[in-house]
Image (cartoon, rainbow, N blue to C red):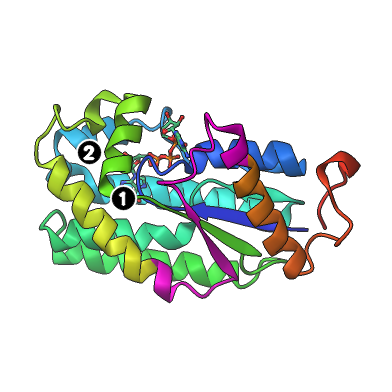
Amino acid sequence: MTVIVLSGPIGAGKSSLTSILAKYLGTKPFYESVDNNPVLPLFYADPKKYAFLLQVFFLNTRFRSIKDALTDDNNVLDRSIYEDALFFQMNADIGRATKEEVATYYELLNNMMSELKHMPKKNPDLLVHIKVSYDTMIKRIQKRGRPYEQLSYDATLEDYYKRLLRYYKPWYEKYDYSPKMEIDGDKLDFMTDKQAREVVLDQIVAKLKEMGKLPESWNKSTNIQID
Ligand SMILES: Nc1ncnc2c1ncn2[C@@H]1O[C@H](COP(=O)(O)OP(=O)(O)OP(=O)(O)O)[C@@H](O)[C@H]1O
Ligand SMILES: Nc1nc(=O)c2ncn([C@H]3C[C@H](O)[C@@H](CO)O3)c2[nH]1
């Protein structure tokens, strides 16, 4: 049983790489609730009013996914529950949550995280972090085209996105729930460049082999499930 989680800022390519990886390894993908998330557009329209509600929504769906993923077989998740606090802390730091909401959020998060200790598997096996610069992030957000994420929708999003990148750096450095690795999302255009895709998959397979999660003899043509 192997669980891989992706992390990275908005538009870094987590969902895209989750699909590629799940297909390549023959495992099951889990996606963040975005298109079926009724609170997300409300949040972008009025962040101060909806930051807390959105966070509870995401925390709930992430908890459900991680619970399923940690009890199921081989899985890839497109965002980790460990990033949840990063988002809320950042929103709280810019005045989008009251101190009561912050206290309630952390109590709920700690409560949920302590439940994970009782799962058959307590942590993921590997975190794959996609690192991107501000320019790449904006290009990808534009390419995907969700209206409420565009700078033309709200000019303050520039500051929000730049701030998010600043929060990610120490978050990744401190992350220690599992082995981790970083993918260069600026250089490796794994959506349109076949060679870049191979480089990314080779890096992840090498890491899984190094960790003993894939047999040394594994190659895609053997098409076996990872253990
Ligand atoms: N490495 C890449 N090279 C080129 N295009 C990419 C790359 N990764 C993602 N994209 C494109 O960027 C857009 C955003 O990608 P994706 O939805 O996978 O990001 P994400 O990290 O899951 O975003 P979010 O955090 O908002 O859910 C998509 O249009 C995707 O096709
Ligand atoms: N506030 C807030 N907290 C989260 O935990 C969180 N996770 C994701 N998102 C936003 C970013 C993208 O617009 C979109 C898809 O990732 O959802 C979040 N926003």
Discs 1/2, front: 1
Q: Residue at x 25, y 24 (%)?
A: 147
Residue 133, disc? 1
Q: Residue at x 61, y 38 (%)?
A: 195
The answer to whether residue 155 is seen in the rendering is yes
Q: Quadrant of the N terminus?
A: bottom right
Looking at the rendered structure, the kind of residue marked 2 is: Phe
| Residue 23 place in picture, x, y as percent | 71, 36
Q: CA distance from mark 1 to mark 2?
A: 24 Å
Q: Residue at x 81, y 42 (%)?
A: 220
What residue occupies the far front of the structure in this picture?
Answer: 195
Residue 92 counted in the magenta span: no
Where is 62 relative to 41, above or below?
below
Magenta segment range?
172-197
Where is 87 relative to 187, above or below?
below
Q: Quadrant of the C terminus?
A: bottom right
